[in-house]
Amino acid sequence: MLITAPAEQFLAGYQLREERCSYCKTALQEGHSVSAYAVQYAGDDVWSIPRVYCRDCQSTITEPTLGATELLATGYLGCTMDVATQQSTLTLLGIEQIMKSPAEEGHATL
Ligand SMILES: [Zn+2]
């Protein structure tokens, strides 16, 4: 079954594993404005967010990848507390803008 949802819906509340800017390595914290890079490869129905940047480091998709649908969402970081494990996770909130690069655009990566 194919599940489709507006990008905002899966991006908002997405728990980030990466807590540093992929470019300048600044530690990202709650309240920071960020750009999150999300990608879905052709034939795959799973989205992932492999990279997160400070808003200043990345604000556009610079090198689109052929065969992948890519999004760059700008928003800010919030903190979600899991009461059961007492662990807090950075999550993406307040998505303001999403830039999209469709699969048929860009260069093949070798
Ligand atoms: Zn940065």
Image (cartoon, grey):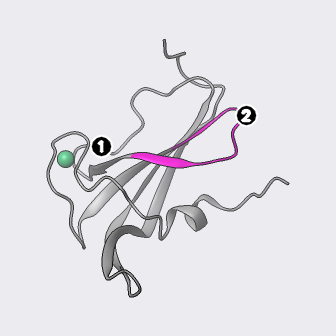
Outermost residue on the top side: it is 110
Spot occupied by residue 29 in the image (x, y as percentages of width and height): 21, 67
Q: Left or right: 93 with respect to 103?
A: left
User: Magenta part of the protein: which range?
Assistant: 39-50
Measured Cα–Cα span from mark 1 to mark 2:
27 Å
Spot occupied by residue 88 in the image (x, y as percentages of width and height): 31, 76
Residue at 70% in and 62% down: 5
Which residue is disc 1 drawn over?
A: 58
In the rendered image, the vertical position of residue 3 relative to residue 86, given as above or below:
above
Q: Amino acid at mark 2?
A: Gly
Find out whether residue 21 is within the magenta segment: no
**Quarter-wise, where is residue 77 in the image?**
bottom left
Q: Nearer the viewer, mark 1 or mark 2?
A: 2
The disc placed on residue 43 is 2
Which quarter of the image is occupied by the N terminus?
bottom right
The disc placed on residue 12 is none
In the rendered image, the vertical position of residue 61 relative to residue 21, given as above or below:
above
SS at mark 1 in the image:
loop
SS at mark 2 in the image:
loop
Q: Say few, some or many: other residues with alpha carbon within 10 Å of mark 2 (under 14 / 14 to 19 / 20 or more).
A: few
Find out whether residue 49 is within the magenta segment: yes
Mark 1 vs 2, N-terminal side = 2
Spot occupied by residue 21 in the image (x, y as percentages of width and height): 23, 48
Q: Say few, some or many: other residues with alpha carbon within 10 Å of mark 1 (under 14 / 14 to 19 / 20 or more).
A: some
Residue at 60% in and 25% down: 105
Residue at 24% in and 72% down: 30
